[in-house]
Amino acid sequence: MTDQQTQPQITCQNLWKIFGVNPERILQELDPALSRAEVQKRTGHVIAVKNVSFQVQKGETFVVMGLSGSGKSTLVRCISRLVEPTRGTVEIDRDKIMAMNQRQLIELRRHRMSMVFQHFGLLPHRRVLDNISYGLEVRGMSKRDRDQKASEVLEMVGLKGWGKHYPRELSGGMQQRVGLARALAVDPEIMLFDEPFSALDPLIRREMQDELLKLQAVVHKTMVFITHDFLEAIKMGDHIAIMKDGEFVQIGTPEQIVANPVDDYVRAFSEDVPRHKVLTAHSIMKTDYPSVQANEKLESALEIMERLGVPAIFVLGPDQSYLGTLEKGKALAAGNTVTAGTIATKCAPVSPAALVETLIVRAARDDLPIPCVDGNCCLGSVDRSAIMLAIGSQSTPQPD
């Protein structure tokens, strides 16, 4: 996963897909007050995707999570126009997909994007290596070159030596690795995943998730990943869109969705999530923890600690850099002959991106506040009580 801020590679605006004999008319006459079920009952049309807008940054994994029938699989097919949207726009690197003719669409699918399916989609009469190289064969690449490329990606997904076998000779997890290798072989810019691991046993599913995360750290593809599993969504995604009845209910990072679900529907998914594995130091830190400059006398530091009732205080440089933590007991023992910086204890700072689970052992061993530092700048503190509250509470407000 990546936090890199870039121009969006995929942009969908006001996307609709209505199934039925006259979807355009239904869309024009649609009563916004009607639910999806009411529209279907009155008109016989099904709203699969309803006015969906989102962007996917280059190199990120964007997860669409929803229950069966939410419209998520239809949505991912609208991106490549395997399913024709009823209305709306789709852009890939600002190329307008809705304006492309059939030849241009075929070129887009052959060269710039690939798809991994839930039930693998392998050709049973072809050996593994030939399945992987199929997209390259369609492009017109020579057999020698495509076999070489297929062998490279086969090794990348951990199946070296299996190229001459048929799909029926492989386990489900191995078959999905072949499907993943086939998608990678064409070196696409964009990879679309339609519930790729949902047909696998839990242990194999976890292994495949880990494998894909490792691959993404190397290949940095733009990924749209469809799932009905919220735990899979927070594990795989840089951003998650929760989908219900064809609409996006909430879009955010895994941390944002777990910490601040917008309604009871989202909260129902997030309430059983191990919060310490999702929340970061930034989400629970206090930004107003008291501090003094390194050259200040201990008298000033002690006065602040006494007034606020805290056992320690941060010592900062003139550029807000963290220099150490001054404990009240040490300050009292030293008298007022030295400055705060000379007796401060240098505690190991943590990044604002550090997961709460990495702070639990430290908080149990030491009751001093943990400095949260970005670069050289001290952003705030994380204390034991904040960590315990983050683990046990149902929602955690984001800092201002």
Image (cartoon, grey):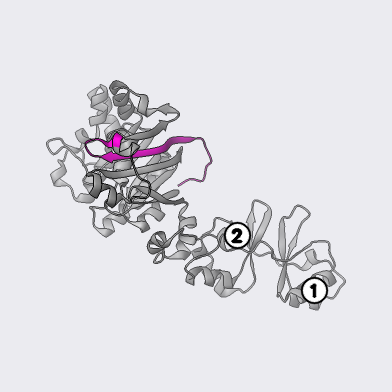
- Residue pictured at 74% horizontal, 74% vertical: 308
Q: Which residues are magenta?
A: 1-25
| Residue type highlighted by circle 2 | Pro
Q: Say above or below: 63 vs 326.
A: above
Q: How busy is the neighbourhood of tag 1: few (under 14 within 10 Å), some, or many (20 plus)?
A: many
Q: Residue at position x 43%, y 41% from top?
A: 53
Which residue position is annotated with label 2? 399
Which of discs 2 and 1 lies nearer the camera? The answer is 2
Q: Looking at the rendering, in which quadrant would you find the C terminus?
A: bottom right
**Residue drawn 42% across and 36% down?**
10
Residue 332 x/y as whole percent? 80, 78
Determine which of the numbered discs, if any, sits on residue 302 in the image: 1
Side of 395 relative to 214 (left or right): right
Residue 141 visible at all: no
Residue 376 placement (x, y as % from top left): 68, 52
Q: Is residue 97 visible?
A: yes
**Distance from Cα at disc 2 to Cα at disc 1:** 27 Å
Decide: marks 2, 1 in contact (CB < 8 A)? no
Q: Is residue 330 left or right of residue 129?
A: right
- Say if the magenta span includes residue 335: no
Examine the structure image and report whether residue 13 is included in the region drawn in magenta: yes
Q: Quadrant of residue 28?
A: top left
